[in-house]
Image: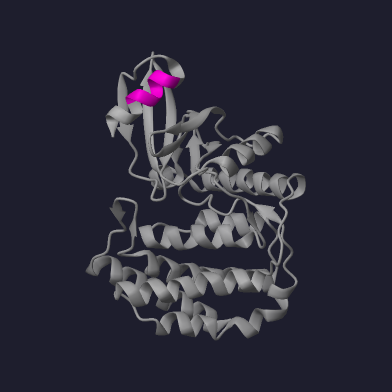
Amino acid sequence: MDELIINICRATFHDEPAKIKRCSVGLANYVFIVEIKESKYTVRLSTEKNAYNDTVRLLGKLTEIGIPVPRVLYCGSFEQYDYVVLSYIEGEELWAVYKQLTKEDKKILAKEIVHIQREVSLRLSEHVEDWTWLDFVHEILDRAKVLIEENGFFETEKVIRVESQIPILQMYFEKVEPTPYLDDVTTKNLLVKDGHISGIIDVDWIGVGDVLTFAALTYVALLNMGYDTDYVSFILDEMDADDIQRKAFLFYSLMYCVDFMGERGTKYKDKVVEVNLQIIDRLNDIYDRLWNEWRSL
């Protein structure tokens, strides 16, 4: 695939890259970092037609309101691939630096990400039709159930137990409005440099609904890595989450835990999400911990 990247660089920069690095992330896309004349750029590829139309539109909107996202430099198609070339933002993803962060660092990052989310919610608008938050919740759980059945590494009963708790929060879910927010900014896609957020990457869509889900997804990711969850506690405090919101947050954490279970062993493009006995035991332990927390509320 390096030859393809070289050809795209020739067509866009009229030069060849000195270095090409395939990123380990990017399950839905092929992602590369290229270096041309001592400057770095991100190249993303997809076999899907018009794959980056929404990406280009959203990055433009986010740039306008001051959100630190990459700039779109070029986009087009080459052979059977659509591509987008983006400016490169310096920094490490949150998961890569988390263990080196102090509590004060985490508090600062939590304050910054909540500010970013509020800006997105207040200043962006996304048109949605035939939308309810309950439909979204059911969609996540239905997908988890299907993938768990197909892959066979976990018990679908765990999803069914979570589904059975929906009536407890039904009135809360019914009041959730289609508010825009960045729903995939978790331990990944959030770049950190010198103790501050330096950028947000891999923005292909904007979530609409309850912003608490990004905190819950981050929470499960941190538990899955065996890290402390102070950062998420600071996020909830910064959001002034009340008792019912914290209960919803815990439900979303269970929802994403079974979502993680469903992804294990699933193939995306040319990659299969890793699964082994250690991962299975860890996710089962996380589920049990979250379930016990939920039942104790």
Q: Quadrant location of residue 281?
A: bottom left
Q: What number of labels is visible?
A: 0
Q: Is residue 9 magenta?
A: yes
Q: Residue at x 48, y 44 (%)?
A: 49
Residue 196, horizontal then vertical, whole percent: 55, 36
Residue 269, horizontal then vertical, whole percent: 34, 51
Q: Residue at x 41, y 75 (%)?
A: 146
Numbered range of the magenta stretch: 6-11
In the rendered view, does 231 fall on the left or right side of 124? left
Above or below — where is 79 with respect to 223? above
Considering every residue shown, the one lying at the far front of the view is 79
Of the 4 image quadrants, the one containing the N terminus is top left
Please identify the dominant SS of the magenta region: helix
Of the 4 image quadrants, the one containing the C terminus is bottom right
Above or below — where is 253 with respect to 97? below
Whether residue 285 is visible to the viewer of this picture, yes or no, is: no
Q: Quadrant location of residue 178?
A: bottom right
Residue 15, horizontal then vertical, whole percent: 38, 14
Q: Is residue 85 magenta?
A: no
Residue 288, horizontal then vertical, whole percent: 41, 78
Instruction: Check the image and tell me how it is coloured.
Output: one colour
Whether residue 297 is visible to the viewer of this picture, yes or no, is: yes
Q: Residue at x 54, y 57 (%)?
A: 232
Q: Quadrant location of residue 259?
A: bottom left
Most foreground residue, 6 or 166: 6
Most foreground residue, 60 or 195: 60
